[in-house]
Amino acid sequence: MRSPLAIAGQVVLYAAFATFIAIFSTHPQYRTLAPDQALVKLSFSHAGQLAHDCRNRSAEELAKLSPNMRAPMECPRERSPVTVELELDGKTLARASAPPSGLSRDGASTWYERYAVPAGKHEVSVKLNDSARVNGFNYSREEHVELRPGQVLVVDFNPEKGGILIQ
C-alpha cells in the first residue's frame, strides 16, 4: 500500500503535466494566413489522354510475334503530361506540367499547391491541357470571385463534372 505522501506527490505531478499540456495547446497561437489573406489551392489528379495513337500492325509484324502476342492493334500505354496555368488578376500564379505517374508513365498526373492571396474581388483564369497532341490548352475557365479573409478557394479538375472546377 502506498503512503499518503506518495499519492499526494503523484497527484501534484499529474496536475503539473496537465497544466503544461493545457498551456502549450493554446499558446503560442499558430496562424496559417495573415488576417487580410485568403488561400487558393490548385489540386488535381487526372490521367492525361494517351500520348500516341493506336496503330494497325502489318502482316509481317504479326508473323514475327509469338501466337499469344498477335493483337492486330498496338496501343502504347503512355499518357500525356497534364499542363496547367493559373492566373489571378492577369498575374500568373502557376504554370507547370505534371508528368504521368507509374513505371510505364500510364498513371494519373497529380498536382497540389497552395497560394496565399489578398482577400477581395479577383478574376481567376485556369487553363489545362491533358493531351500532347493538342497545341495550347483544351480546357479553360474564367470566373470572378470574391474571397473573404481566411477563405479557401479550391481549383480542381474533373472531366465528368465539366472540366475545371472553381469552388
Image (cartoon, rainbow, N blue to C red):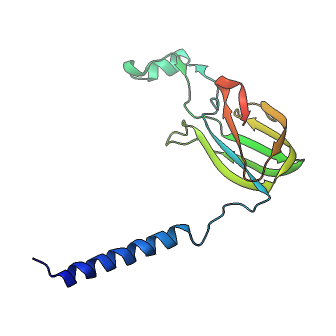
- Of 101 and 133, the residue lying toward us: 101
Measured as percent of width and height from the top left, residue 96 is found at 72, 48
Identify whether 155 is placed above or below 116. Answer: above
Q: Quadrant of the C terminus?
A: top right
Instruction: Tell which residue pokes out farthest to the left in this image.
Output: 1
69 with respect to 92 (left or right): left
79 with respect to 24 (left or right): right
Measuring 42% from the left and 22% from the top, which residue is drawn there?
69
Measured as percent of width and height from the top left, residue 58 is found at 56, 17
Measuring 48% from the left and 18% from the top, which residue is drawn there?
62
- Of 144 and 74, the residue lying toward us: 144
Instruction: Tell which residue pokes out farthest to the front in this image.
Output: 4
Q: How many marks?
A: 0
Measured as percent of width and height from the top left, residue 94 is found at 76, 50
**In the picture, residue 146 is in which quadrant?**
top right
Q: Quadrant of the N terminus?
A: bottom left
- Of 60 and 35, the residue lying toward us: 35
Identify whether 10 is placed above or below 113. Answer: below
Measured as percent of width and height from the top left, residue 156 is found at 68, 38
23 with respect to 9 (left or right): right
Measuring 32% from the left and 79% from the top, which residue is drawn there?
13
Instruction: Tell which residue pokes out farthest to the bottom in this image.
Output: 5
Measuring 55% from the left and 40% from the top, which residue is drawn there?
105
88 with respect to 101 (left or right): right
